[in-house]
Amino acid sequence: MKRRTFIGVAWPYANGPLHLGHVAGCYLPADIFARYQRSRGFEVLMVSGSDQHGTPITIHAEKEGTTPEAIAERYHRRNSKALERLGVSFDIFTKTHREGHFSVVQNIFLTLLKKNMIYLEEMEAPYCTRCGRFLPDRYVEGVCPHCGYPSARGDQCDNCGRTLDPKDLLDIKCKVCGSIPEFRTTEHFYLRLSAFQEDLMKWMEGKKHWRPNTYKQTMNWLKEGLKDRAITRDITWGVPIPVKGYDNKRIYVWFEAVCGYLSASKEWAERISDPEAWKGFWLGEDTRHVYFLAKDNIPFHTIIWPAILMGYSEKYHLPDDVPANEYLTLGGEQFSKSRGHALWLEDFLNSYGADQIRFYLSYIMPENRDATFDMEEFIQVVNAELVGNVG
């Protein structure tokens, strides 16, 4: 019987090019681990892809006066090529805007709905009277109530990593026109996350070997008590809700994106002309699941994704380890695609070799604390260590 390792790597939003923070955060450590596992004789399946849905893509499209699909496809192609040039050895790097992914997500949605793990409820959501629409996620911004960051989004604060509800934001405003929204009633589907509190607590008893930050964040969520979360949005770009009467809403990107690990595995099996091959990685007992991501994505992989899998079927393998990295910083600030504070992977590959980039980022890997990218140190380390000692 073959020993198997499934490696899931966080899906980047296809709203812009990848930067070195993405590489150090998850793609390089995942690739190093995958290569090591293969060298030990393990059968490895490493998957990821472009997260093509959600408000980051629609906002970018509106700014350019084009379609969300045009933006999503453009950056999927560019980022796929950049990762290939860097030498990241994915078994499949796919995308979420495809029928195979839709099918898997909708099947999971309907299964949970049938089990009463998903339910319908009214909620108050920000509505811009000037724009004439509801404002999901990144369509609103304001001051984070936890850390005071002035540009927190409607779903999460980029500074402290806390997940948010738009009603939590201080000085809330519409991202598009800058006006102050009002709150109106809308109807959405909720994941009954609270129902998984006990099962997740029991599951976490065997996870004390995790990195301290990963374990601490997860336990903090559980100690605070899990709250049910809305998993649909008032938006028309994304995975359609497989229930009649909700054509103007879509499944929330963070529910459907993590389902991409399963849909990508099934697509990989189709590509190698062995449609049942994915089952050995997801249903077999001789497999290990490891997820690579940055610290702001921890709860989605240690709370929400395991809960979805628990509710979907007890047959599916849950995460064994989630070695989340800290942040790579530039000039004392976190790399940020949305703010343009970054060193872009494409540009760096045009000036330096993949081995040079991989070596230095491995040298400063932010595994247990934030690390700073320093250009002078990059040149010095490459010349002294890589060229001088390795050759």
Image: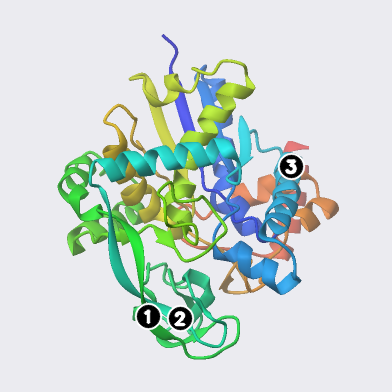
Q: Is residue 50 visible?
A: yes
Q: Give the residue type that dot 2 points to.
A: Tyr
Q: Residue at x 34, y 79 (%)?
A: 168
The reply to whether dot 3 and dot 1 touch (C-beta < 8 Å) is: no
Q: Is residue 229 left or right of residue 369?
A: left
* First in sequence: mark 2 vs mark 3: 2
- Asked whether the residues under the numbered discs 2 and 3 touch, taking CB atoms below 8 Å apart as contact, a structural biologist would say no
| Image marks 2 and 1: residues in contact by CB distance under 8 Å | yes
Q: Earlier in the sequence, mark 3 or mark 1?
A: 1
The residue beneath circle 3 is: 355
The Cα atoms of the two marked residues, 2 and 1, are separated by 6 Å
Residue at the disc numbered 2: 127
Local packing at callout 3 (Cα closer than 10 Å; few below 14, some 14-19, many 20+) is some
Please determine whether, in this image, residue 188 is positioned above or below residue 8: below
Sequence order check, earlier mark of 2 and 1: 2
Counting from the top left corner in percent of width and height, residue 290 is at: 43, 37
Q: Position of residue 339 (x, y in %)?
A: 63, 74
Other residues around mark 1 within 10 Å, as few (<14) / some (14–19) / many (≥20): few
Q: Which mark is residue 184?
A: 1
Tag nearer the camera, 2 or 3: 2
Give the answer, above or below, for where 309 lies relative to 340. Answer: above
x and y percent of residue 335 in the render? 60, 66
Gap between marks 3 and 1, in whole Å?
53 Å
